[in-house]
């Protein structure tokens, strides 16, 4: 069962800096017509007209780009799904997601921490004011969406001491080599390599896609068996008429999504997990360092041998089962609580979300 929280949509302006007809549009449908299928399209959603115009003039923040083909330090933001904007819990299939309004990216001074956390902080780690251990993750893809692309993942724990030694880079294994897989892999490695798994963890990333996967979309995917529906034209054998039929397709990056789900479940009863969105290339040191590590990963050699990803059905470490009639998916088990903090200005309309999910299917098929 899903608790849907309704909200009143805000005004939005879609700035198309590079597309068929650059300009500012007030609906996603209009903007999408200018950028979909356009090589090198650059566009971004803004809450005000002035910000949208500033973006087009070249003085605004980094754009959304449909593909990346250079090794510059600029990294693309990804479109975001629309989660509930209330502080109420959204519960589905034993999966609890708590959406909270954006709060400042604040750190706790070591003197405000309990003695045991002060010791950990002295090793180079940072904590939030509510005593969550902080880790920054990022993904990168050189030539994202193109043949021969190279993707990497980066995990940044801290700038000195033990934390410095935990920082991590990795080339994304297998195919496809996309930025989204780099983002997911970075979160996976952060959870797997967390040095203090019993302490609540705040994962800070600029991947709106990753946050969407673990919060807004996962309950739906659990109910649907990690598939999504698409409309496909169907013609009768005699050719007399045609209609649209629903076709089920596996979600994009399902192997990593399932693996990440297992890792989150294994933390159930231990340290909680919070995802916090941070804007890319806005001067946040942890995000910049994670970005550098991800780029290093994309330059590494390809990994050899197959990768064994965990699946909920095969995992033996999970102990909390839900009735099959409740889940609709055999083998679905209780998931740890997950929180997410984000800025409402990044939220997408239902129309944008639907189109983005279609793009994810296309990306998976191309890979």
Image (cartoon, rainbow, N blue to C red):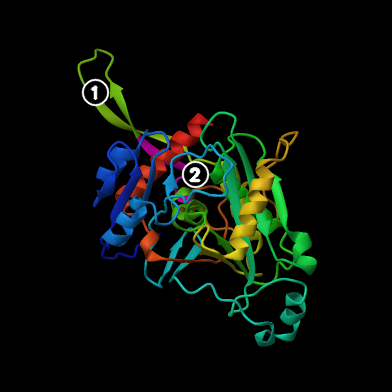
Is residue 312 shown to the viewer in this render? no
- The C terminus: image quadrant: top right
Query: What residue is at 35 percent from the left and 37 percent from the top?
Result: 36
In-image side of 7 versus 172 (left or right)? left
Mark 2 closeness class: few <14, some 14–19, many ≥20 residues within 10 Å:
many
Mark 1 closeness class: few <14, some 14–19, many ≥20 residues within 10 Å:
few
Give the residue at mark 2: 226
Residue 203 to residue 81: above or below: below
| Residue 227 forms part of the magenta stretch | yes
Instruction: Pick the residue in front: 358 or 168.
Output: 168
| Location of residue 230 by image quarter | top left
Q: Which range of residues does the magenta coloring cover?
A: 222-230
Is residue 120 shown to the viewer in this render? yes
- The N terminus: image quadrant: bottom left
Residue 77's label in the rendered image is none
Give x and y (percent) for residue 215.
48, 58
Residue 242's label in the rendered image is 1
């Amino acid at each position: 069962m899903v608790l849907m929280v309704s909200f009143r949509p805000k005004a939005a302006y879609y700035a198309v800096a590079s597309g068929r007809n650059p300009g500012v549009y007030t609906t996603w449908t209009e903007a999408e017509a200018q950028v979909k299928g356009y090589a090198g399209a650059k566009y971004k959603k803004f809450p005000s007209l002035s910000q949208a115009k500033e973006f087009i003039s070249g003085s605004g923040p980094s754009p959304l780009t449909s593909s990346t083909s250079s090794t510059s330090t600029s990294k693309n933001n990804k479109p975001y799904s629309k989660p509930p904007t209330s502080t109420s819990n959204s519960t589905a299939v034993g999966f609890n997601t708590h959406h909270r309004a954006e709060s400042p990216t604040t750190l706790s001074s070591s003197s405000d921490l309990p003695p045991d956390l002060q010791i950990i902080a002295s090793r180079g780690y940072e904590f939030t004011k509510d005593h969550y251990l902080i880790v920054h993750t990022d993904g990168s893809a050189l030539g994202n969406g193109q043949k021969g692309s190279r993707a990497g993942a980066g995990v940044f724990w801290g700038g000195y001491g033990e934390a410095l030694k935990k920082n991590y880079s990795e080339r994304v294994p297998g195919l496809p080599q996309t930025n989204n897989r780099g983002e997911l892999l970075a979160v996976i490695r952060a959870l797997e390599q967390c040095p203090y798994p019993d302490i609540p963890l705040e994962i800070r990333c600029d991947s709106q896609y990753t946050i969407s996967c673990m919060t807004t979309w996962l309950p739906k995917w659990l109910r649907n068996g990690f598939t999504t529906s698409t409309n496909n034209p169907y013609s009768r054998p005699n050719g007399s008429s045609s209609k649209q039929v629903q076709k089920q397709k596996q979600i994009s990056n399902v192997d990593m999504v399932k693996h990440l789900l297992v890792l989150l479940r294994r933390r159930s009863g231990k340290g909680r997990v919070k995802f916090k969105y941070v804007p890319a290339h806005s001067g946040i040191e942890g995000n910049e360092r994670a970005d550098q590590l991800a780029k290093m990963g994309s330059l590494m050699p390809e990994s050899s041998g197959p990768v064994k990803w965990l699946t909920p059905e095969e995992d033996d470490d999970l102990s909390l089962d839900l009735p099959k009639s409740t889940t609709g998916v055999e083998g679905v088990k209780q998931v740890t609580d997950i929180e997410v903090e984000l800025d409402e200005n990044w939220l997408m309309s239902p129309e944008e979300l639907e189109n983005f999910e279609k793009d994810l299917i296309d990306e998976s098929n191309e890979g």
